[in-house]
Amino acid sequence: MRTRPRFALMTAVAAAAALTLAACEDAGPSEAEDPAAGEDSTGVESGAGDAGAGGECVRADQEAEEPVDPEEAYAPPASWDDAAPEVAAGYGDDPRVEFGDADEPEGLVVTVLEEGDGPLVYPGDEVVIDYHGQQWGSDEVFDSSFERPDPAVFPLANLIAGWQEGLPGTHAGDRVLLSVPADLAYGEIAGDDGMTEDGRPGGTLAFVIDVHGSFGAASAGQADATETGEAEALPVEIEGALGGPTCLTVDSAADQPEEPTATVIAEGSGEPLEEGDNVVLHFTASTWDNSIEESTWDGMGAETAPVGAGDPFTDLLLGVPSGSRVVLLMPAREPGAEAGSPSAQATAFVVDVVGEVPQR
């Protein structure tokens, strides 16, 4: 599991909170109950919603994007006209690709081997998948997540072009065969070992992929989460309905926090987060003087992060039910720094717990 280092405020306050928590014997969060959450069709455990359900928070200097019909906008490339390779085993089982008499394709070809009925995968989504890779015509497997304890989680934007073009338009529950030419994969074969110049599998590659789900800009917290009434006492103003994007304004005249705090302002109906969970989050963050704002709602999609792994930012979410909306107040990283600098200020976050990445 990885967390994108894209958000400077999230990274900075986590470092600051680590120092604060180390100095406070009783500052750690309580342990959560043992969850037994079911898994919905998104591949993200219960608590996930759709950003469209709660409306859209748009700043005065921003323009809302026109809605897109995903079924029309995103469709995998055309499938095989001639005989396709055969894939042994079904969805969820470790596959093998038998190439037989299939001709090596010139371009990207997507074959839906088994159709799911879950939500659509969008470009730029973070996908929850199992995958199996073979070089074209080879019986050897060069990589497979089926041999690992848990499904893989990847942002499509960080993957080879063949996956970025071939997976959008598929659905949770699909098993697909991607036949990816060298120019959309790792490059041409450079030697007798079948590898590229930089030592990766070369030529056309065949991937069998089980799409368990995805999350991104359209994922959100629970639209019908129960408001707790705690928001009114906090030094922040939050715009945006539950189940949708948020904007955040801090009361800069209020005292800055000296210790990290987490306040659930709307409680979801999912299971409480516990140590070892990989949580899916949307958040908006602001420095105390409102001079810097960062948000996952900017089109890049939700973040994933482990809970209970020593990161004070996400460890504050231990015991919080999936689907909840939470306000985190984090102390300044360097209270004695030059006035007005980000490191001299506390930071506020409004966090939507979208759900958890499923485990086997």
Image (cartoon, rainbow, N blue to C red):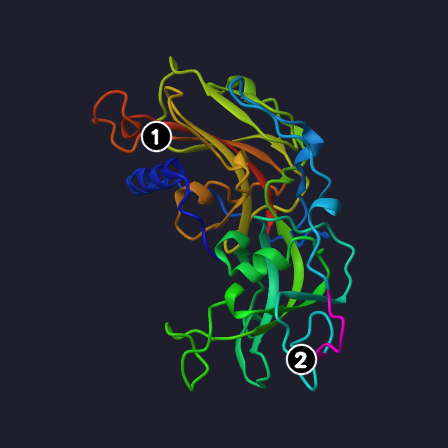
Looking at the picture, how far across and down is residue 334, in whole percent?
A: 25, 31
Residue at x 53% of width, y 25% of height: 247
- Above or below, 172 relative to 130: above
Q: Which residue in the protein does label 2 denote?
A: 103
Q: Is residue 83 magenta?
A: yes
The one of 259 and 53 positioned closer to us in this rendering: 53
Q: Which residues are magenta?
A: 79-87
- Above or below, 183 relative to 96: above
Of marks 2 and 1, the one in the foreground: 2
Callout 1 amino acid: Pro
Circle on res. 321: none
Q: In what element is the residue under mark 2? A: loop
Looking at the picture, how far across and down is residue 352, in whole percent?
A: 57, 36
The one of 67 and 96 positioned closer to us in this rendering: 67
Callout 2 amino acid: Asp
- Above or below, 35 relative to 203: above
Q: Residue furthest top?
A: 253
